[in-house]
Each structure stands twice: as C-alpha cells, then as structure tokens.
Amino acid sequence: MSETRRTPWWMGATVYQIYPRSFADSNGDGIGDLQGVLRHLDYLKRLGVDALWLSPIFRSPMADAGYDISDYCDIDPLFGSLADIDRLIAEAHARDIRVLLDFVPNHTSDEHPWFVESRSSRDNPKRDWYIWRDQPNNWRAALGAGSAWTWDEHTQQYYLHLFLAKQPDLNWRNPEVVAAMHDVLRFWLDRGIDGFRIDVIHCTGKDPSFADDPRCQAGQPLSDFNDQPYSHEVLRGLRKLVDSYPGDRMLVGEVNIRSTERVLQYYGAGDELHLAFNFNPLDAPWDPVLFRTCIREVEHWLQPAGAWPTWVLSNHDNVRQRSRYQGSERAARAAAVLLLTLRGTPFIYQGEELGLEDAHIADEARIDPGGRDGCRAPIPWLAEPPHDWNGTSPWLPFPPDADELAAERQVGAANSMFALYQRLLAARKASPALLHGDFVELPSHPEVLAYRRQLGDDLRLVCINFAEAAHACPQSGDWTVEIASDGLGEGEPYAGTLNPGQALVLRPTEA
Ligand code: NOJ
C-alpha cells in the first residue's frame, strides 16, 4: 500500500461502516457474510471510501448480534472463515482501502470458555477474570432493561453485565485479562488489520467501590455515563500496543457519553484514542440550532486540544438519518454535504449512500433485544426482489422503496444519492482545505449554516439551508458552485441564494 503521507491516513480518510449480517449474502442463507463484502469491494472503491469498519464477525452465540463474543480469534461460520478475512484484508489493501475490526473489550459472551471456567467454581483460576459479588448494587444494564447483576445459582454469587446477562463484564483490573486481550489485538494486527473500533471503551473502568449510583436509581443504564479513570489506563495500554506495530494502525473509540468535554479526555495526551465518536449528531433531528451547537462544541473542546473530530450521522444502533429527518430526501442530501465537509473524519453507515430509511418491523418480528432492527435492514443490491439476497428471505425485511433505492438503480445514475456521495468524496480528496483545513463559521440567517474551510491557498465555502424556503446567503468575492445537494447549478457562478433545503460547496471562481 502507498504509505508515505504527511499526516496519518485516518485524518484524511472517510470510513465506511459495514454491518456484515446485512451487507451482502454470498451463500443464500439470508445472512450477509465476508464473501458478500468481497463481492462489493469495487462498489466501495467506486464510492470513494478509504477504510472499512466491520461490526463484529467473531464466533458468537449472537445474543447481541455478535457483540457477545465466544472466541475473539476466529470468524463465526455465519460470516465465513479466517481464510475469508485474510482475503478480504488483501483485496481491500490492493484497492488502497484499510480494514478496521470491532474490538469488544468490556464483555465477552457467557459462552466464552473464559466465563465458562470463571463460573465453574469460586476457586477457579479464571474466577477473577469477571466481576463477582455477594451482593448486587443498583447498577442497571443497558440491554434487557433491569439489574446489571445476574445471580449464579451454582456458585451462589452475582456477576456484573452492563449489557445482556449473556454478556458478562471482564475484570480489566486483573493483569491476566489485560494480557489475554492484548494477545487478541496482536492476533489481528499480525494478520494485517489497520486498526479497531473499540466498543464502549468508557465502560472498561468501573467504580472500584461499587457504590450505588443515583442515575441508575432514576432508571439510566450505567453504560450511559460510566466514565472512570481506570478506563484511561486500559486505553493507554491498548494504544501502546497498537503503536508498537508499523504502519499507522488506528483506534477509534465508542465513548457513548453525551459530553464533548468528557469525550475529549479519551484522546488522552496523544496516548489514548486516535479518534473518538461524537454521538450528539447521531440522534439529532435535522435542525440548525442542534447542529450549530454541536459543531461549536466540537470546535470549542477538540480543536484547541489538537484532538481530531469524527462525524457520524447513522450506525447500527440508531435510527437512520433519513428516517430521523421524516424521510426527507432533500434533508438527507443536505446532511451528506454537511457530513463530508466538516473538519474531521466522517463515517458513512452502509446504505446511507443510497438514502435508505429504517425498515418497518412489526414488534413481534423484532429480533434485537434493544429494538434496533430497523437500521439493520439488508442492503438492496438489485432492483428486482429479492435484491440479490438469494435463497430464503433475509434475516430482516428490506427498507422502504428498496426497488427504487437499490444500488443497481443508483450506481452510474446522474444525480442519484450515490452519485452525490461520490461527488462529495471526490471533492474532499481533491481539496486540502476540505480534508485538513481550518473551520470558521460564517455569519448567516439562523436557518442557514455557513462555514469556511481553508488550508493555505485552498479554500471552500459550505452553505446549508435547513429551511423549506429559499434564503439569501451572500458571500463576498466570486464563487462557483462545486457541488449542490440537489445537483442544480454545479459548475455555475454562485448567485448568493440557496434553494429550499439546499446545501452547496463553493470554490473560488478562477480568474
Ligand atoms: C455498542 C454496540 O454498538 C452495540 O451494538 C452493542 O449492543 C453494545 N455496545 C454492547 O456491546
């Protein structure tokens, strides 16, 4: 792979999240797999992304769709084999696309041999690999809606699980756990993985006093706010290990705390996360006040600290952005312009580039214990049902308008949502200002967000109209429309107004 770049690759990259169960199915069992991903690498190259993050593909009883792992160093047969991931890494690298895996350090499956041993007797050598207590406290689990403690009849103690009872929490204060989990990272780094998305990293440190928490009393799960100093020590160990490998390996962490100031702490002194997810835009409606506030927060906290931001509008845990924006294609298009022009590393969730909405799933057909099935609907590749999902029907129903929004219809079609993402990604790559430049918010109408990105001589303006009415957005100087969310007027001089709901990327008009 081409390697010598001035800044680390992940600062100029766009990352694409693959939720393997729902991406593409190669063997007709209705569940996506690694061969399915391999088949669509050229699609991802054509889209223009630089890296893939694969949600968990490891051996798992699938109580939490793979976030309950029973073997960190093997691929679940549902998804394929170690040979398949090796091929995927090689084929992605051959296309200059990096591959990130999902690392789940906070908990294993209760079927992991470590936990099977741990629960076998109180004096088992692995007893202390998990968190056992005689008495539960009031901590609440995030999945399964109840206590974070489950009674083990056999050994007459409670074990801690911040998620499902089938996801016991590891005890990261035990050095043997640290060593075993470091070995997991080594296993994958040695195979050529470019880095990891780390699941709920802020949960790995627990309050050592196990005191009751008033927020749990009020019904909030501990994982929503657990933020103990020890998580940072865990993270520094992971970072040191990853940094000892050649080739710019990267850690992006899920710090699911809705405070940008707290999230900043997880970048450490350049010795913790390279990138941390920023959750505020992920559940926000399409609202100029919310986005403005969120962007200002990020600039206020992260910029002075030299912490590089991330931008994410959808993932496998949250309602897709287009559904949050009441199904509005116009808003989804404008949001794409925002996502791909802010200062930071954008993450695209599979299907976002097709403008997909959540599938409508009847309550009785829901599979996920957290009710998150809608955003996990399968990707429609071909226009004709079953949309290249052969054999039995896929594990979840398709999203609305699957025929019309299928990749087959959009790839190569002028001004499709896919084409807009393609144009934006190409424009990012060609502009140092968009990739690495400063961000300055410009004065504008309250329903318009306008900002400048600049690096040296390279300059772009971005104007986003959140309103249903046209708005003036005058800018001094001569500007050319480089990209329009609705495709209108690209390559033409900017007249100083925005159509209803329109977002524009402007470049200085060449003399
Ligand atoms: C966050 C993951 O994104 C989510 O899908 C999972 O249920 C929890 N962590 C527990 O691993």
Image (spheres, helix red, strand yellow):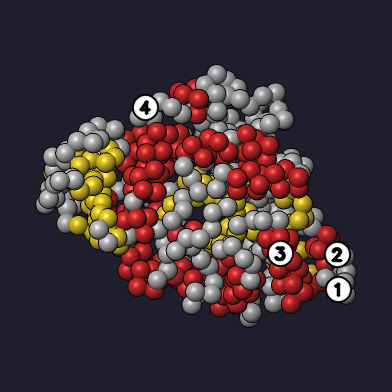
Which secondary structure lies at badge 4? loop
Whole-percent x and y of residue 9?
49, 58
Give the SS element for disc 1.
loop
Tag 2 and tag 1, C-beta contact below 8 Å: yes
Q: Say the numbered circle drawn on residue 186.
A: 3
Q: Which residue is mark 2?
A: 117
Q: Earlier in the sequence, mark 4 or mark 2?
A: 2
Q: Amino acid at mark 3?
A: Arg
Query: How crowded is the residue under tag 4: few (<14 C-alpha within 10 Å), some, or many (20+)?
Result: few
CA gap between label 4 and label 2 equals: 58 Å
Residue bearing mark 4: 414
Callout 4 touching callout 2 (CB < 8 Å): no
Residue at image location 43% in from the left, 52% down from the top: 346
The mark nearer the N terminus, 1 or 3, is 1
Mark 1 surroundings: few (<14), some (14-19) or many (≥20) residues within 10 A: few
Query: From where the camera sits, is residue 398 visible?
Result: yes
Q: What amino acid does circle 2 point to?
A: Glu
